Amino acid sequence: MSNLLINEPPLQVLPSLAAAIGLNEALLLQQLHYWLRHAKVEHDSKMWIYKNLDKWKEQDFPFWSKNTIKRAVKSLKDQNLIFVEKLAPNSFDRVNHYTINYAELMKIELKQRQTPEVTEQPKMSPSNKSDWAQEQPKMSPSHEPKMSPSLRDNKETNKESGHAQKIEGDVLAVREQNAESIMNWQQPSKETMQSLLMMAGKKLDMTENQYLSHVSDFKAYYENQAAEGKPIKRENLRQAKLKLWLINIADRQPKQAGEDAPRPHSNRSDSFDAGQGQALSREQQIEINKQRMQKMGLSS
C-alpha cells in the first residue's frame, strides 16, 4: 500500500466553507475547532487554546510556511471569525490564545442556506446528445404528466416561503439569544464602576438602588439593540459601554437637592415616570432610552 494514501489522521475541510472564506482559512478554522474540543483554558465564557507559529506548523500544517499561517490567521481575524488574545498571567509569556467566533460563523451558514444550490449538469458532446435523444422512448401527449400552472406555482411558492420562514426563525432565535444574554449579564459591582469613573476623573455619588436602576436602563437599551441585530457580546466591551453610560450621567445630571433619595429599581417590563406619576410600558421606556442615548452621542 502506498504511503501517500491516508494512513494518518487527515485534514478535513468542507468545500462550502472554503468557497465562503478561503481554502487556507477553512483548513485552519477546522483545525482550531478540533483543538477547542480539548481546550482547558476558559475566558470570557469561551474555551481557548494557545499555540505559537512553530506549533501550528509542527502539529497541523507542515506543508505551509510560517508566513502562510500568519496570513491565514490575519484573514480569519479580519473576517471576525476568530478571536486572538494573549491570556497568560505572566507578562513574559506572549503566546497567542485562539477561539472561534461561532456567532459570526452562523451568519455565513444562514447566508449559504439563503443561496440556492446550483446543480451541475453533465456535459455531453453533440454526438452523444443526439444519440441520447434518439434512445429516449417517445410518449404520446396523453402519456405526458400534466400539472396545471397554478398548482406548480403554488408548490414552488410554498417551498420558497417555508425556506424563508425557517431562515427568519433562525435569525430571530439568534437575536433573542443575544438579547437574553445582555439582560442576564452579571454587571460589575457599584464599587468597581465608581473606581473606574474616578480613574477617568469623574465622580458619581449614588446608592446601590440608583446604581442598579442605571444598570437596568443600560440593559434595556442594549437588549433592544441586540434584538435589532447589533449585540455587544464581549465582557470588556459591555463594561466599557457601561462606564461611558455612567460618565454621561455624571456629566449631564448634576447633583440636585433630594438626589440621594433611592430611585425604584426598574425591571424588564415597566419603568416609573416620576414626573407624570404613571407606569411606562417597556416600548415607551426603550424609546426614551433611545432618545437619551442619542443626546449622549452613544447610539450605534
Image (cartoon, rainbow, N blue to C red):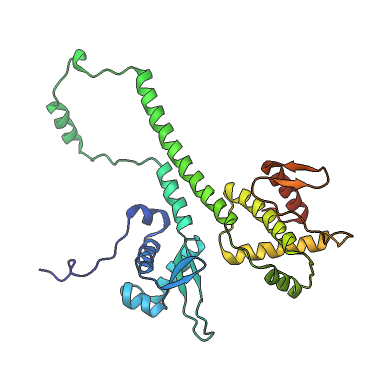
Using residue 255 as the reference point, say whether residue 59 is left or right of it: left
271 vs 39: above or below: above
Using residue 299 as the reference point, say whether residue 58 is left or right of it: left
Q: Looking at the picture, how far across and down is residue 185, in whole percent? A: 58, 60
Q: Looking at the picture, how far across and down is residue 243, in whole percent? A: 70, 65
Q: Residue furthest bottom?
A: 92
Q: Looking at the picture, how far across and down is residue 299, in whole percent? A: 70, 53
Residue at 73% from the left image edge and 60% from the top image edge? 209
**Viewer-proximal residue among 198 and 63:** 198
Using residue 239 as the reference point, say whether residue 37 is left or right of it: left
Using residue 69 as the reference point, say whether residue 223 is left or right of it: right
157 vs 294: above or below: above
250 vs 291: above or below: below
Q: Residue furthest left?
A: 1
Residue 282 lies in quadrant: top right
Can I make out residue 233 in this image? yes
**Viewer-proximal residue among 277 and 295:** 277
Residue at 14% from the left image edge and 26% from the top image edge? 136
Q: Looking at the picture, how far across and down is residue 4, in whole percent? A: 18, 69
Residue at 40% from the left image edge and 71% from the top image edge? 69
Location of the N terminus by quadrant is bottom left
